[in-house]
Image: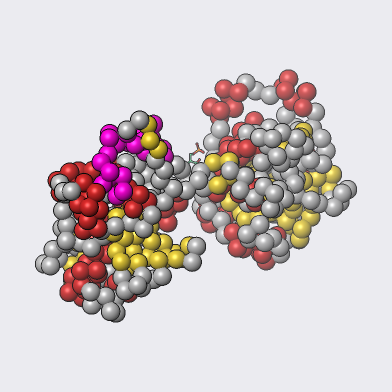
Amino acid sequence: MTAYPFVFSLKSATTFYAEGDDLIFPVQGSSQGLRWRSPTQGWRKTLACLAADGADLDGIARILQSQDGSVDWAKLHYLLGRLDAKGLLSRSVPGNGTVLATLLPMTVRFRFALPKLSPDSHYRLSRFVSLRPEQGQWLLETPLSPAKLWLHDGQALPLVACLAQPTSLDTLCRAVPNCKPDKALAVLALLVAAGAAAPCDAVGQLPEDGNIALRQWESVDLLFHSRSRPGRHDGLCGATFRFLGQIDPLPALKPLAADAGLPLPIPDMARIQQQDPPFAAVVENRRSIRDYTGRELDLALLSEFLFRAARVKAQTDADSPSRPYPITQRPYPNGGALYELELYLSVGACTGLTAGLYHYEPLGHRLLPISGLTTDVQQLLDNARLNSGAATQPPVLLTLVARCQRPAWKYQGMAYALMLKNTGVLYHQLYLAATVMGLAPCGLGMGDSDLFAEAARLDYYQETAVGEFMLGGRLSGDLGS
Ligand SMILES: Cc1cc2nc3c(=O)[nH]c(=O)nc-3n(C[C@H](O)[C@H](O)[C@H](O)COP(=O)(O)O)c2cc1C
């Protein structure tokens, strides 16, 4: 099959059990496990060896020869292929007293294809590759493939470093000190099989560079996308509560000084429900408005807007085993009912409210002043103007800030993606509340999270800005209606 000096192993955590004479291998992520019918004594020994230290092809052949009296090479390759087809087999390249690299299938979808390396080609890494230390070793992965490559103690790193540029096999064979050429080529073969490297064309381009869809993905975006949903990796995804018992969950509401701040008038929701236009009319009339000419905003309107869109309607204690953390109820939905998004208001022009930066406290329906109209707050308002192409600054800029530990405490592999989904939900809620009130809404796609953290004196890692929303007043003729 190959001249590569691979050592084969069963992927860690692979289990199998006997059913009569057969061996059954359950396969994670697939209802169809692998049934190995009546394996010979030689194969039973081989599987035990693959589950322990692993063996190369010659080692497997020796076990089969000693136990079964002969080696059927075609059958050997066929049976290894069956393990491969279920993503159960990893391949390592041994070095001098160490392991240079191990290719590990992450899901049953990975198909190992043995690369034919060509001495006439130059090879290069995919721009989607990322490399990072994990558990004291080097981990290389790419969102293009459901396999990952451990570079263990990093002895093979010089070879990977060369591959930033188109590189010949000759050069690669000399890249790792004290490494035999066949070992270096075996590491390259694993990189190619993992989708992390490929032969280039005459101008150093990889096939991915000519793929219109891939060209439009930024590497960090594709990695984030592929890792924040199940399917292409072996990480946990979902409500795992991984910090339960180690770190207390954040309270449902940001702890704030009781009674501080500016209490806002409570709108008469019963009257509002009677008088509001039909939902269909609100949805049909909704649009983004960036022109504030002839519009006015006052504290009563701002208060009603915040109350309709984002107040806390009720609080629930952490009393359910499936939800061992406190939650709130609000007018809009939120993944896990964690309600991690806080609203901050940069106020430039609102009658009855001093210009400056405020935090909306949604339980007491209060505004908590943070600062006046500082240079930072002016900059936030001006950035909003620039990002929207508006002629003037918005009267109010709402910044959506995520208390990141709320979802991260509960969810694994999807917490940040969930925050962004929740941000979109709140945008639409703000759009609808503004539209029904005749105000001028406009979501923004960008904002400077560091600038906001400085302006609001927040820790970027605890509470970070994830969305911006401009709000303008009602047309003067509509006031009081
Ligand atoms: C997530 C999101 C980001 C947006 N970003 C911007 C932006 O940065 N600048 C802007 O002027 N409008 C922005 N908008 C408004 C869109 O341009 C607008 O919704 C779109 O053109 C459709 O027009 P309509 O809202 O009037 O129906 C954004 C809207 C959303 C929902």
Query: For the view shown, which residue lies furthest in the right direction?
Result: 259
Colouring of the image:
secondary structure
Q: Which residues are magenta?
A: 22-46
Q: Quadrant of residue 452?
A: bottom right
Give x and y (percent) for residue 367: 79, 48
Q: Is residue 41 magenta?
A: yes
Residue at image coords 82%, 41%: 364
Q: Quadrant of residue 307?
A: top right
Residue at image coords 25%, 41%: 40
Residue at image coords 72%, 50%: 248
Give x and y (percent) for residue 187: 27, 64
Residue 120: tell me if it is visible: yes
> In the displayed structure, does residue 426 sit left or right of residue 197?
right
Task: State which quarter of the image contains the C terminus.
Answer: top right
Q: Quick one: 429 or 98, which is closer to the camera?
A: 98
Give x and y (percent) for residue 475: 65, 38
